[in-house]
Image (cartoon, rainbow, N blue to C red):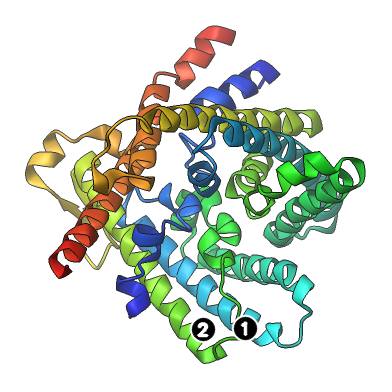
Amino acid sequence: MKGALRDNPVLALALGLCPSLAITTQAVNAIAMGVAVLLVLVCARLVSGLLDSVLLERSRAVVHILVVAILTTGVYEAMGSLFPALTRSLGIYVPLIAFNCLILDGTPGEARGVGRLALDALGMGIGFTLALLLIAVLREALGAGTITLFPLAGWSGVLRIPVLHDAPLRVMTMSVGAFLTLGYLRALFAWIELRRREGRT
Amino acid sequence: MSYVGIILTLVFVNNVVLSQLLGLCPLVSASRRVESAAILGFAVTFVSSLAALATWAVERLVLLPLDIGYFRIVAFVLTTVGLVRLLDFLVLRTSSSLRASLQVYLPLLVPNCAVLGITLIAERSGYGALESFVAGAAAGAGFLVSILLLASIREKLESEWVPRPLRGLPIALISAGLIALAFLAFDKALVKNLIG
């Protein structure tokens, strides 16, 4: 859980935001992308951790990239057949998980056990999903006045926010909104961190 | 689409960074100085144009004839990674000073989502060989333009007072957001008016 909240990868470390930030236009997209990254991340750490003991030092980087690419293919094909419409709306960003900095910038597996590595990855994946969801909810609420979740029996899955829905800040759903939301969120977290450190001294 | 149309669209309208939000890690980490931004920008342009051409060849010569489209992600990843390794090897053999200056940026070039994204965009647009090459170069040029703009803003910001929580990454992201806002002026209608 430490990985999920304190070392939150997107908000604190700003790694792995490249291919994922673009799809934070709707809450449902963020959840789907978050879960996809989580699956690839955990499996990649497990497989790479196991392989590292038999691999030569210099071949590891390439093998890691290959493992991530194969896992991404699996997740992409599975998503494509389970949720075709959702996967189509995510476009090239699901295949791009293969080059996600968060997954590739892994710590070497030897120092700690494989189980510990997978648990860390799970924490990071959950944190990543939560961060994506936070950005997506902010962008969608401000930019469209709605929050789109999964449609459940009879309910369309779209929450409407009264005032914002009539006069949304459309620019927030464009790429501008992604940059500004992440920038100000990072500033907010930095401010909280500064306050906490000042309180301690 | 004509070549001019592809270039205008990928540099200004669908800019890889400012509109597609690809390649943010290298954008943020190499934009402190205009010089380093320019080196990385040119390297990305070079790699992405060759990668778009190479992945077009892989698509046409391997994936389509064998009907193994599901293998595309692995094939494209291997192609782009292999291409960067090959270039690294060739540069090593020609000049050591160029290599020394490029080596720092190699980690930013290998897992670069902008390069992989460009190849995927070119594949989805159904471009031919030359169109893919031009699209790769234009998308890389789009990356170069945005990283140069951001780097010059960040250099100016160094002499300005910035509130402490905003220093570093937040102000860089907000600056990039404002550049993206300016780029909203370029839209599909503009391209249509320019080239008919």
Q: Is residue B125 left or right of residue B100?
A: left
Viewer-closest of A18 and A85: A18
In the rendered image of this protein, does residue B116 appear above or below residue B31? below
Please report the residue visible at 36 percent of the width from the left and 27 percent of the height from the top. Answer: B181
Read off the chain for label 2.
Answer: A
Please report the residue visible at 51 percent of the width from the left and 91 percent of the height from the top. Answer: A115
Q: Are marks 1 and 2 on the same chain?
A: yes
Viewer-closest of A75 and B85: B85
**Label 1 amino acid?**
Gly
Q: Is residue A178 left or right of residue A101?
A: left
Q: Which residue is mark 1?
A: A49
Q: Quadrant of the N terminus of chain A?
A: bottom left
Q: Is residue B15 visible?
A: no
Secondary structure type for disc 1: helix
* Place of residue B56 in the rendered image (x, y in percent of width and height, measured from the top left): 78, 42
Q: Which residue is mark 2?
A: A117
* Place of residue A141 in the rendered image (x, y in percent of width and height, measured from the top left): 20, 47
* Place of residue A18 in the rendered image (x, y in percent of width and height, measured from the top left): 49, 50
Q: Is residue A189 left or right of residue A3?
A: left
* Place of residue B169 in the rendered image (x, y in percent of width and height, measured from the top left): 38, 46
Quadrant housing residue A53: bottom right
- Count neighbours of disc 2 (C-alpha within 10 A) and say few if under 14, some if 14 to 19, many if 20 or more: many
Please report the residue visible at 45 percent of the width from the left and 49 percent of the height from the top. Answer: A89
Evaluate if marks 1 and 2 touch, with contact meaning CB atoms under 8 Å apart.
yes
**Label 2 amino acid?**
Leu
The mark found on residue B153 in the picture is: none
Gap between marks 1 and 2, in whole Å?
A: 8 Å
